[in-house]
Image (tube, rainbow, N blue to C red):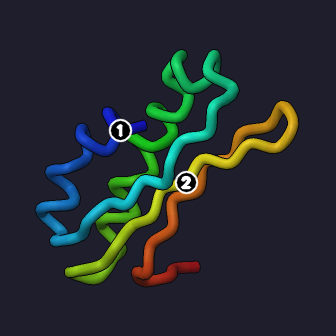
Amino acid sequence: MEQALEINQPYAERYQVSWQLSPLPATPWSWLMSGGCSRYSVTTSPNAAKFSHAGGLIQVQVLIEGDEVEVQVVDQGHRYS
């Protein structure tokens, strides 16, 4: 996950936002290590940066419940429908 945010750092700098990654859970490492989180974050975090206000904070969190993994990318930016 950290690597995905590093890859997207140019977006953060361009849109003048910053990332905050919550501590990663201990499992399931097989999914995390296979790049599942990184692939997801590489595709969603640029949009969060793009639609956030300058100076905004984008929070990235990985939640695990049972055998399901949820990646949340939360920004305080514009909403669209």
Residue 79 is left or right of residue 47, and the answer is right
Callout 1, which amino acid? Glu
Secondary structure at badge 2 equals: strand
Q: Nearer the viewer, residue 12 or 64?
A: 64
Which sits in the foreground, 59 or 46?
Answer: 59
Q: Which secondary structure lies at badge 1?
A: helix
Image vertical order of residue 67 relative to residue 54, above or below? above
Q: Quadrant of residue 16?
A: bottom left
From mark 2 to mark 1, how far is it between C-alphas?
11 Å
Quarter of the view holding residue 1: top left
Q: Position of residue 76 (x, y in %)?
A: 43, 81
**Left or right placement of residue 17 versus residue 65 in this view:** left
Please rate how many residues cluster around mark 2, counting C-alpha atoms within 10 Å: few if below 14, some from 14 to 19, many from 20. some
Mark 2–mark 1 CB contact (< 8 Å): no
Q: Residue furthest right?
A: 66
> Is 13 drawn above or below residue 57 in the view shown?
above
Q: Considering only vertical position in the picture, is 29 above or below 54? A: above
- Residue 2, position in %: x, y? 35, 38
For this view, does 41 lie left or right of residue 30? left
User: Exactly how many numbered labels are in the figure?
Assistant: 2
Q: Position of residue 34 (x, y in %)?
A: 54, 16
What residue type is disc 2 on?
A: Gln
Q: Which residue is mark 1?
A: 2
Query: Which residue matches tag 2?
Result: 61
For the point 21% across and 60% down, which residue is it? 12
Residue 36 lies, in percent from the top left, at: 56, 27
Residue found at x 31% / y 33%: 3
Counting other residues with Cα less than 10 Å from the Cα at mark 1, is it few (<14), some (14-19), or many (20 or more)?
A: few
Eyeballing the image, is 35 above or below 68?
above
Q: Nearer the viewer, residue 79 or 20?
A: 20
